Image (tube, rainbow, N blue to C red):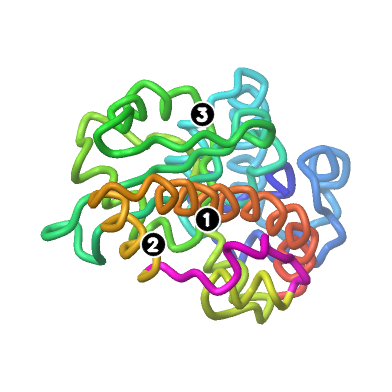
Amino acid sequence: MLTSTYIHMPRIGATVEKRIWSGGVRTWDDFLDRKNDLLISPSKKEMILTGIRDSVEKLESRDFEFFAKSLPKAEHWRAFREFSGKVAYVDIETTGLSPASSSITVVGIYDGKEARTFVKGIDLDDIVDVFPKYEFLVTFNGARFDLPFIKREFPQIEFNQLHADLMYPLRRISLSGGLKKIECELGISRAEETVGISGFDAVRLWHQYERGDEDALDLLLKYNREDIVNLKTIIDMTLPRFIDNKFSE
């Protein structure tokens, strides 16, 4: 979808982008071949040609920061395929809902192959060195919850990556509600031990662990791992629908 995108280019908005698509031109290569067929002013065409040249160069050099800055935040998902080779699916557990009065207990990071969980009092500080390894982050409600929580406790983490908060594009394809509800609608199942566990249960499990219950921590980490692994399953299942929906808007 990134190579069908024009709204990150200077002075090119959604209206012009839709006009390009409605003219049967989808990709940057299509534009180069068929630009003369489009009802767009010559000045706009020149801007787009410059934008395509810049974008191809940035993509070839894997300059994810360029696209993170130039794409509207709600449209970062468009770059997923191009930067999914260094993706982190992220989910956190906390002692409460407010960053001001609560703290992080677990940060889960899944790279598509290995799921790692970082635990308060054990190795949570390691995330400072781990996050910069990734070019693309995937969360669910991470823009409002997970990333601000992490940033408050670890302000040295830049979060300069592309970031797809799946909650929003999922709503555009009529998948709304919490993560567990959406998993059920998509037919994604969980282990018997974690079915029905909620964020509030995660807080309870942490407090049980603090009182010496190691099994509670094991269950909490299993719950978190399922969250991050399922994020990959969700975007793999729904990305084609995101794209179809965008072209049909």
Dot 3 alpha-carbon crowd within 10 angstroms: few under 14, some 14 to 19, many 20 or more: many
Q: Position of residue 151 (x, y in %)?
A: 25, 43
Q: Residues within 10 Å of mark 1 (few under 14, many from 20)?
A: many
| Residue under label 2 | 202
Amino acid at circle 2:
Ala
With respect to residue 80, does 208 lie above or below?
Answer: below
Q: Which label is found at residue 223?
A: 1
Instruction: Tell which tag, 1 or 3, sits nearer the viewer.
Output: 1
In magenta segment, residue 194: yes
Q: Quadrant of residue 190?
A: bottom right
- Picture residue at 75% right of the left edge, 52% below the top: 236
Q: Are marks 2 and 1 in contact (CB under 8 Å)?
A: yes
**CA distance separating discs 2 and 1:** 8 Å
Residue 171: image x %, image y %? 59, 76
Please tell me whether mark 1 sits on a helix, a strand or a loop. helix
Callout 2: few (<14), some (14-19), or many (20+) C-alpha neighbours within 10 Å?
Answer: many
Q: What type of secondary structure mainly makes up the magenta span?
A: loop
Q: Residue at x 45, y 70 (%)?
A: 198
User: Along the line of sight, which residue is nearer the eye, 174 or 247?
Assistant: 174
Residues in magenta? 186-199
What kind of residue is marked 1? Tyr
Residue 153 vertical placement versus 56 (above, below): below
Label 1 to label 3: alpha-carbon separation: 23 Å
- Sequence-earlier tag: 1 or 3: 3
Q: Give the image location of residue 81, x and y in percent.
A: 72, 41
Q: Nearer the viewer, mark 2 or mark 3?
A: 2
Kindly identify the amino acid type of the residue bearing the numbered disc 3. Tyr
- Front residue (pair 50, 150): 150
> Tag on residue 134?
3
